[in-house]
Amino acid sequence: ASQYDILVDASDNFDTKYLLNDLAVKLDKPLVYGSILRWQGQTSVFWASHGPCYRCLFPEPPKDHVPNCAEAGVLGALAGVIGSLQALEVIKLILAKSDKRWSLDESLVGRFITFDAKTFQQRSVTLQKDPECAVCSKKVEDIVLPETELAVACGVSTLDLDNWQDYEFIDVREEDEWERGYIPDATLWPLSRMKHGQFPEQNEKRPTVLYCQSGLRSRLAMNYVRDAGWDLSSVQDLPGGFAAWVGPVAQDT
């Protein structure tokens, strides 16, 4: 990324957002930030040498699972609004660097915009640099970029499961949900057990698919098995969960 002048964050997961922020601080690059969820949108420009970074505002990722756009839903028109605002900020940053008539004062460096598409209300908040920020208060050479595997990028669509018998399915729902129907030959291992540090043995001979009812809990389960040391190259989750499953269904009688 060092060959680029501007970094643009158009991601929808926290692992990527925090990695991009730390990279931007380390390389002293402006990060044009954007985020959307349902009717809400946010945008800003984070540039540690001229103002605060993303971690000055949000020091750490949320501990609980936060659904991404695919899980929670988002308006395509809102993505266009926030994306257009980001594009404008990129243009202003280019002008500030190449045209003496422009300065960073016209950009969103040090300002945070929130937009509600339902009410059309917009707020602009002035941000302050955190002198104790875990990243931008450090010397550049002391910033260590985290190694991360993005479990959120490992979904497998039902269209890929024509040969579903070749997969090891793990159902992370609770027992009462399982009793109403499940994928044949799946193993029930509720997410509540994973939260207490209990995990099944990973099948080393077949790829594993984690699923829940709608796809939300299986994404969280991906993070739990990653932290437990599973090899994520052979682990996937089922987008849409059991509700979107179009294959055969078993039921205890």
Image: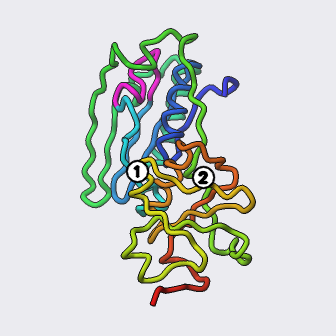
Q: Residues within 10 Å of mark 2 (few under 14, many from 20)?
A: few
Residue shown at 40% from the left, 50% from the top: 195
Furthest-bottom residue in this view? 253
The answer to whether one can see residue 51 in this image is yes
Mark 1 vs 2, N-terminal side: 2
Q: How is the image coloured?
A: rainbow
Query: In terms of secondary structure, where does tag 1 sit?
Result: helix
* Residues in magenta, as a range: 46-57
Asked if residue 198 is among those painted magenta in the image, a careful observer would answer: no
Vertical position of residue 169 compared to residue 144: above or below:
below
Q: Which mark is residue 153?
A: 2
Vertical position of residue 37 compared to residue 143: above or below:
below
Residue shown at 44% from the left, 48% from the top: 82
Quadrant of the frame with the C terminus: bottom left
Query: In terms of secondary structure, where does tag 2 sit?
Result: helix
Residue shown at 50% from the left, 75% from the top: 242
Q: Amino acid at mark 2?
A: Ala
Q: Which mark is residue 195?
A: 1
The answer to whether one can see residue 76 in this image is no
Front residue of this view, candidates 109 and 207: 207
Image position, residue 4 (x, y; %): 66, 27
Quadrant of the frame with the N terminus: top right
Q: Amino acid at mark 1?
A: Lys
